[in-house]
Image (cartoon, rainbow, N blue to C red):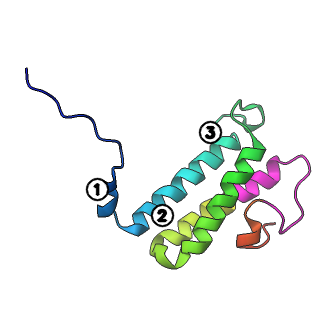
Amino acid sequence: MSEQPPEQPPYSTRQLEEIPSVEVISRAAVMLLSAGAERLGLADADPETSPHRDLDEARRLITALAGLVTASAEYLGLHAGPLRDGLQSLQKAFREASVVPDPPGQGPGEKYTGPIY
């Protein structure tokens, strides 16, 4: 019986060296975008009754996404527009989900993106 090499973690240091920075940034942004949508309950048929809905967690994820997208926009090229659109959609969904919406400019990530109405 031949011995199998140990499994490598999904992203070893060697593999990350070979991935262009725009792809690493985009992957991180998509993960934050997906996690934010989950925490808003958007993956369920009725977001208001979703067991995954957690607006506090969603706020943190959306703010982190806003910081990442804003800080790296110049490097993202054609990826910047769709990521900004996704971010804005999450910000609007958060505003709609909030019982007492934040004033314009004070919602999640708005200190980086400007007010979302």
Asked if the residue at tag 1 contacts the one at tag 3, i.e. Cβ–Cβ closer than 8 Å, the answer is no
Instruction: Please provide percent x and percent y for residue 111.
Output: 76, 70
Q: Tell me the SS state at disc 1.
A: helix
Dot 2 or dot 3: first in sequence order is 2
Q: Nearer the observer, disc 1 or disc 2?
A: 1
* Residue ID at (36%, 49%): 11
Asked whether residue 23 is in view, the answer is yes
Q: How many labels does the image show?
A: 3
How crowded pointer 3 is (Cα within 10 Å; few <14, some 14-19, many 20+) is rated as some
Q: Nearer the observer, disc 3 or disc 1?
A: 1
Task: Compute the Cα span from label 3 to label 1.
Answer: 34 Å
Q: Tell me the SS state at disc 2.
A: helix
Query: Which amino acid type is shown beneath numbered disc 3?
Result: Ala
**Relative to the observer, which residue lies in front, 45 or 20?**
20
Numbered mark located on residue 25 in the image: 2
Query: In this picture, is 57 found above or below 52?
Result: below
Task: Compute the Cα span from label 1 to label 2.
Answer: 17 Å
Asked if the residue at tag 3 contacts the one at tag 2, i.e. Cβ–Cβ closer than 8 Å, the answer is no
* Residue ID at (68%, 34%): 52
In which quadrant of the rendered image does the C terminus lie?
bottom right
Q: Is residue 97 magenta?
A: yes
In which quadrant of the rendered image does the N terminus lie?
top left
Dot 3 or dot 1: first in sequence order is 1
Query: Which amino acid type is shown beneath numbered disc 2?
Result: Ile
Q: Name the residue under label 1.
A: 14
Q: What stretch is highlighted in magenta?
A: 90-107
Task: Compute the Cα span from label 2 to label 3.
Answer: 23 Å
Asked whether residue 84 is in view, the answer is no
How crowded pointer 2 is (Cα within 10 Å; few <14, some 14-19, many 20+) is rated as some
Instruction: Please provide percent x and percent y for residue 106.
Output: 84, 65
How crowded pointer 1 is (Cα within 10 Å; few <14, some 14-19, many 20+) is rated as few
Q: Name the residue under label 3.
A: 43
